[in-house]
Amino acid sequence: MTDLDPVWIIDGVRSPFGRFGGGLRDVSVVDLAQQTLRGVLRRADWSVDDVSELNAGMAMIEGGLMVPARQYAVAAGFPDTLPTLSIDRACCSGMTTVGLGWRAIRDGAHSTVALGIESMSQTPRLLHETRWGSKRGDLVVEDLLMLRNPLAGGQSIARTAGEEAVRRGVGREEQDAWAAQSHARYFAALSEGFFDDEIIPITTPKGDLAADEQPRADSALEKLAQLTPVYGGPTVTAGNAPGLNDGAVALVLAGSRAVGDRTPLARVHSYVQMAGAPTSSVFLPGLAIARILDEAGLTARDVDVIEINEAFAATAAVSVKTLADGDEGLAVHLAERTNMNGGAVAIGHPTGASGARLVLTAARQLQRTGGRWAVAAICGGFGQTDAVLLEAVR
């Protein structure tokens, strides 16, 4: 957590985030990765020969893709000698790739590429008990996209998130209001051209996809209030939670020696990981932000830009309340600075990719506002969380 070897985000890009079964459905995850990786190298004007390692985060590795990071590197034309690492920290995975790059560069690496990726449309069902045969009885087919928590008795993550939110004083109305705000802020940012330099088109068998598919321009509190909670939970609905999405995000990180006369996007000041009880994810990002700010000698009021993943609207709302620590005025102030261009409820949540998107969006928004400090945080992996603190280029 020192200033000994600054780490910089040179640039980053993301694919459009596709709906489940939408425009990216027929794009293999390897093809999605190679298009995104080639796109970020073009955007950053960075040579594959200058990359020290590729870290790739993906939450659905159990779907059957072997050593995905290595496959991505080869497909994108990286040298055969490039070390790669595949990471599964569920939704944290994309942000973890940024943290690992930060650590590697501080230890002397020239530059790294951080990739977060997911194709939920291509996640297969698992047919159990078939390896050695089954003489009698039913075969069990598991759908990984049901997103159950095996550390909480197999309960739906959506249900436990809603229960934890209610226990912490954030009910259905507040979650619906956050969801409606997410869409409104997204479309305001879209109209202002904020995403023009963030999204690159992806070539699919049916043509190029150039825009996010998940956002709903007609989202409104009245419509959200009519939806029934899912999986027997108290508050989480299809309207105040993101969809199942496809997408990829890539960033180039470099040390000061590699930057040269370039102007980076932002400085990665620090990175933290935390963990808690298996159902604590809904408030953990707030704790992670508090910790990373404290270690940097900052307070929540010092931060100009906050990105908290809307795994559910409840996650962002509860985490802001947690960070405010009982100060209602501070909570309002922080909410105004959180997800200013919309969040995952609007944009979508390709699980392995979202953490990297938060870092990219935070860096770009920090540059846009002219502020000094930005922080991004995400929960995932049955009670884990990551946070990244960024500083503006001065």
Image: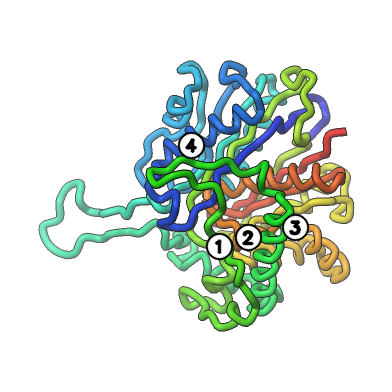
The residue identified by callout 1 is: 242
Do the numbered discs 2 and 3 sit on residues whose CB atoms are within 8 Å?
A: no
Considering the numbered disc 1 on the image, is that residue within a helix, a strand or a loop?
Answer: loop
Residue 167 position in % (x across, y down): 66, 75
Tell me which amino acid carries mark 3: Met
Do the numbered discs 1 and 4 sit on residues whose CB atoms are within 8 Å?
A: no
The residue identified by callout 4 is: 33
Q: Give me the C-alpha separation between circle 2 and circle 3.
A: 12 Å
363 shown above or below 39: below
Tell me which amino acid carries mark 1: Pro
The residue identified by callout 2 is: 310
Residue 138 position in % (x across, y down): 19, 64
Q: Residue at x 88, y 55 (%)?
A: 301
Quarter containing the N terminus: top right
Q: Residue at x 77, y 41 (%)?
A: 390
Tell me which amino acid carries mark 4: Ala
Considering the numbered disc 3 on the image, is that residue within a helix, a strand or a loop?
Answer: loop
Q: Give me the C-alpha separation between circle 3 and circle 4.
A: 27 Å
- Which class describes the residues within 10 Å of circle 3: few (<14), some (14-19), or many (20+)? many
Q: Quick one: label 4 or label 2, which is nearer the N terminus?
A: 4
Left or right placement of residue 349 versus residue 322 in this view = left
Q: Quadrant of residue 317?
A: bottom right
The residue identified by callout 3 is: 340
Residue 157 position in % (x across, y down): 51, 64
Q: Quick one: label 1 or label 2, which is nearer the N terminus?
A: 1
Q: Quick one: label 2 or label 3, which is nearer the N terminus?
A: 2
- Which class describes the residues within 10 Å of circle 4: few (<14), some (14-19), or many (20+)? many
Q: Give me the C-alpha separation between circle 1 and circle 2.
A: 7 Å
